[in-house]
Image (cartoon, grey):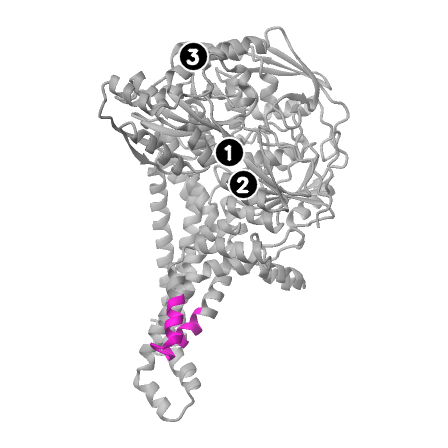
Amino acid sequence: MSAYVLRRVLRTIAVVLGIALVVFVFIRALPGDAATVILGERATPESLARLRQQLGLNDPLPVQFGRFVSDVTRGDLGVGLKSQIPVLSDLRNRFPATLELTIGAILFAVIVGLPAGVIAALNRNRFADNAAMTVSLVGVSMPIFWLGMLLAYLFAVKLQWLPPSARTDIGVTFQPITGLFVLDGLLRGRPDVAWDAVRHLVLPSIALGTIPMAIIARITRSSMLEVLSQDYVRTAAAKGISRGRVVMKHALRNAMLPVITVIGLQVGTLLGGAVLTETIFSWPGLGSWLYQGITDRDYPVIQGGVIFAALVVSVVNLLVDLSYAVLDPRIQYS
Amino acid sequence: MKRTYLSALLAAALIGGASASTLVYGSGGEPVNLEGGNVTDGNSVIVHRQIYDYIVGFKLGTADLAPGLAVSWKPNANYTSWTFTLRKGVKFHDGTAVDADAIIFNVNRWWDPKFQYGYRDQGRTYESFGEQFGGFKGDANSVLKSVTKVNDSTIRFDLTQGVPAFANLLAQGYFGIASPKAIREQGAKYGTPAGTPVGSGPFKFVSWRTGDRIVLAANTAYWGAKPKVDEVVFRFIKDPSARLNELKAGGVDFTVDLAPDNLAAIKADKNLRAVLKPSFNVGFLSLNTKNQYLKNDKVRQAISMAINKKEIVQAFWNGLGTSNASFLPDTLNWANSKSVPADYKYDPQAAKKMLSEAGYPNGFTLDLWYMPVSRPYFPTPKPIAEAMAADLAAIGIKVNLRTKDWAQYLDDRNKDPGFDMYMIGWTGDYGDPDNFYAAYYGTANATQDSGYNPQNIAKLLDQGKSALNQADKAKIYAQVHELTYAANVRLPIVHSRPLAAARTYVKGWVPSPLGSEPFNTISVEGKK
């Protein structure tokens, strides 16, 4: 097991380095650079040349790459060309927001999607099945941007049940510990802060979690249907074990492998940042930050953001792979 | 003093903090940074305006100059030397004096690449200073020759050429005066979210939570009108619809840069009030005279007559824009020629005929590039481009609508062969016609993207810049207006009035035509 984990860690390092190289080359192959974007409509040939020189964009590529590798090996991802903020500092500030939103979205997706899939499978081709699958189809097909706007308008503007954006109300004062505000509120003994953070988390979590919810529901249904037709499930039922026990203990657990895989993939994707949801709900996460970096051709931001996202996805995939062994004792890593 | 900074840093680590009267501003995005000389974006400048004072200010709601840190200023006869008399007794938020030394420190930081506290080796570029003043110390085109302390409350700028608009340049929102002590202590952190910007403006910096908000507290010792609220919170809400939602829900008290089609929704809400900012921009269609068809004067004139500007402005700006035949917005119409018509003539029949006379009775095909981003002058570039394409199709010009990523768009428009036709615009920095014309006429850029940069216009622009009074300027820019109107190279489509809105209890907000104004006149009495 430990040899397997070590191999995977080494492979992850190789993948991240490969991605760093590819990103470094590709973003510089794109037309336009940070100087063009910073100066915008106001650019003149002289001001462009001057700013490119100041930002080090005129240096030969090998020199820039050497500088980049040397910085990365020292744990320094550079400083944003536009903002002058160290990339690591931005990552530190924004990742907790993304992580909290991801947790909220995945919780919503699992809490709604998993039972929906199970109920659909147990009621195959009946009303509950059709209803659950129709809802999941709508969920998969619905543009996040539109859903987010709809949720914000309905629940924040019209009904005024929940706030339309941000992570906390203006009046909420506290000192964060982890950057996960719900947790921080509890750790600080401030349930009011935790509750405020939860209220702000609800709408973006639903908007972001709807597609994963729909996917989880569909995968759970098909996986459950397959397991429910297995001999051991029929045997368990024939032995007189209650239906609930058969479903929960014998069927669901064995149906979970593909579901866990899908959840893992979704978590990996969401942790990379969710541009649309973050934009609609003014959520200060990684997605909008990285998107802005790409728009601004801010090379250190793009490099740092992509390397970090690659690292997160690799780690989540590793955790998912390891969880297989927990769920299915037949699986062993060597 | 260390204790002061410790408190400030502690405050910076805290989240939120609303007090009895908190004014919440829905900003269209996060500032790039909070130090002068390094930014031109509106999201930064609006915060600078609260924290910093400027050597020269503006009269509220106008582009007219008013005393700032300088109570008076006087140029010499040929505008090559400017003497500023400073207001006495003004203190930065950290208690240090705003005097001649402090201002010279700031100017040197922006201007002198070798200045010890410039931190250029750590990424500072001060590009907005270089852009506005012809470069930096040692550059051949630098406007500034020296800045000298005459006494504690008098400074003198000596210039390499006469610049009648020099005071206007200093008044721009980019050049707020910061505390030298704070800069020395904070180094390259100054102006970033990890630093504590210190000015002498009506509000003091409290905290900056990246991606979310900036909090400022009232400067109760302010030399000018004392703030009417205890604190101002700038919330970064990029999406205009989300800003409107927050305004309706009461999450922000006032906001800017809303889509023109939101006007009806704002008017229908009894809790809201629409605020129309004065227009100080131009959105235009640029034609490339290097193109085989567009090099023909008659073709360009036909295009100018084929586009129904009035209808387009009505349809896409919802009444929040005006159309005229000038590059200049109405606030600068003193610089327009009276012999130029109020607007371009819309006459598709005549346009078609003119196209035939030019030798193209069956028309031809051109690319029209529209911007991939929204700007106040073109809030919805694609539908506007579609409308122009439809107008041009009516006279036989088939248009391929094209766009690309913004960085590419900005870069490629200046690369040969350039775009056939493309949409772009300009928002003014200060109230001088040169600020509008010089960006797109009379520069190397003008040659690159349009192939059009005649010497007579370039010469007139140089004369306009050096003209000693408004009457002389008006004569010169009237000629520029006539020449640019006749050339039909950059067709002004709109001068838009950016749409802003506020909750009805917000009183005393006077938006500046230049895009940023201090908030010390605003009150929120009756806010729950």
Mark 1 = which residue? B319
- Report the residue at 57% width, 53% height from top: A157
Q: Give whichever of B88, B417 is nearer the camera.
A: B417
Residue B449 seen in this snapshot? no
Badge 1 local density, few (<14 within 10 Å), some, or many (20+)? some
| Chain letter for mark 1 | B
Mark 3 = which residue? B457
For residue A112, above or below residue B366: below
C-alpha distance separating marks 1 and 2: 9 Å
Mark found first going from the N terminus, 3 or 1: 1
Quarter of the rendering containing residue B315: top left
Disc 2 residue type (three-letter): Leu
Helix, strand or loop for disc 3: helix
Mark 1 and 2 residues: CB-CB less than 8 Å, in contact?
A: yes
Residues flagged by tags 1 and 2 on a common chain:
yes
Disc 3 residue type (three-letter): Ile
Badge 2 local density, few (<14 within 10 Å), some, or many (20+)? many
Which residue is situated farthest in the bottom direction here?
A239
Magenta segment includes A119: yes
Disc 1 residue type (three-letter): Gly
| Chain letter for mark 2 | B
Mark 3 and 2 residues: CB-CB less than 8 Å, in contact?
A: no
The quarter in which the N terminus of chain B is drawn is: top right
C-alpha distance separating marks 3 and 2: 39 Å
C-alpha distance separating marks 3 and 1: 33 Å
| Chain letter for mark 3 | B
Along the horizontal axis of the image, is B439 left or right of B288? right
Mark found first going from the N terminus, 3 or 2: 2
Q: Give whichever of B288, A325 is nearer the camera.
A: B288
- Report the residue at 48% width, 70% height from top: A111
Magenta segment includes B198: no
